[in-house]
Amino acid sequence: MTSCVSSLNELLTDLLDISKLDAGVVQAEVRNFALADLLDNLISIHKPEAALKGLRLGYVPSQLTVRTDPVIFKRIIGNLIANAIRYTEHGGVVVGCRRHHGRVWLEVHDSGVGIPEESLGEIFEEFSQLGGGERNRGSGLGLAIVAKAVALLGLEIQVKSSVGKGSVFAVQLPLGRASDVEARQEAKPRPLRIALVEDNVAVLDAMCCALEDIGHEVVGAETGKVLLSLLGDKAPDVVISDYRLANRKTGFDVIAAVRAVFGETLPAMIITGDTDPKLMRSMADRGVIVQHKPVEIEALQACINGLTNRRSGS
């Protein structure tokens, strides 16, 4: 049961990522950051998985500063490391930088099964997997996500492989300047007035409690009509709604109604289990952020911060 839940969670996460990339709603936030910090974190995340298979996982330390979207770039390299571990039974995986033809590449080397030359063109396709058995426990979307994310960042990826000896995946490394690395401090979120609609009473109560524990004022309701009556004349800082509501209503109906009263620029978020790229694209066109279920409170707070900070210009 644990294995099944883990596999289903991985598949859902990958499906959501593919849907977001296909919908074109993922926007890169480019900044300078230390590569060493990213690699330290990735190695610590994947080392237990490698150890369970008796594999070595390490990297060559680097003092380079990179300029790209750190979240997307981390997902790219994390997927490559996970893929290398999955297809390696003996030896190990090593991550390191290499200069080639005047450019710098971040490379993931493994001593795995390798990829036949005739299959190299297929590995970045969705649901494409090579081999069988335990190696096929993945979603088959990892490298497809890598290819789409690399394209989004305007980078390049190269693959070299030898059957029975291993593979090397190399991602172009956009260099930045160490002097421009942004100092990011964890700040306590400022209290906000949050309008929340969820027609599942238990979920509504849980979300209200979680957001209030952080320090927010939450005006919660099961319908948009009740929400507006509770809000009165005082505008919320952000409106959040489940997408599929009772009586054939949707979260966007709620958002449109609240915006009609308090202004079209009111930050808004939809929470849904729907992965349809068309839905996400339509929400993005209306200035609505989409978060997918299940939503962890930390991710929800980060999304709220992004919405309200953009509005305030901070």
Image (cartoon, helix red, strand yellow):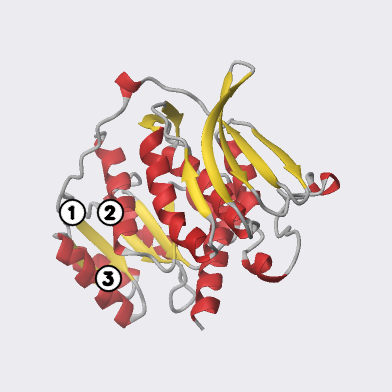
The answer to whether residue 281 of the structure is visible from this angle is no
Of the two numbered discs 2 and 3 in the rendering, the one whose residue sits closer to the viewer: 3
The amino acid type of the residue labelled 2 equals Val
The residue at which mark 3 appears reads as 207
- What residue is shown with label 2? 238
Q: Residue furthest top?
A: 102
Q: In this rendered view, identify the residue nearer to me: 30 or 109.
A: 109
Q: Secondary structure at mark 2?
A: strand
Give the SS element for disc 3: helix
Q: In front of the other: label 3 or label 1?
A: 3
Q: CA distance from mark 2 to mark 1?
A: 8 Å
Q: Which residue in the structure is indicated by mark 1? A: 192
Is 89 or 246 nearer to us in this picture?
89
Q: From the top left corner, tell me how far across and down residue 197 is, in percent.
A: 32, 69
Pointer 2 with pointer 1, Cβ within 8 A: yes
Between the C-alphas of marks 2 and 3, the distance is 14 Å
Residue drawn 47% across and 41% down?
59
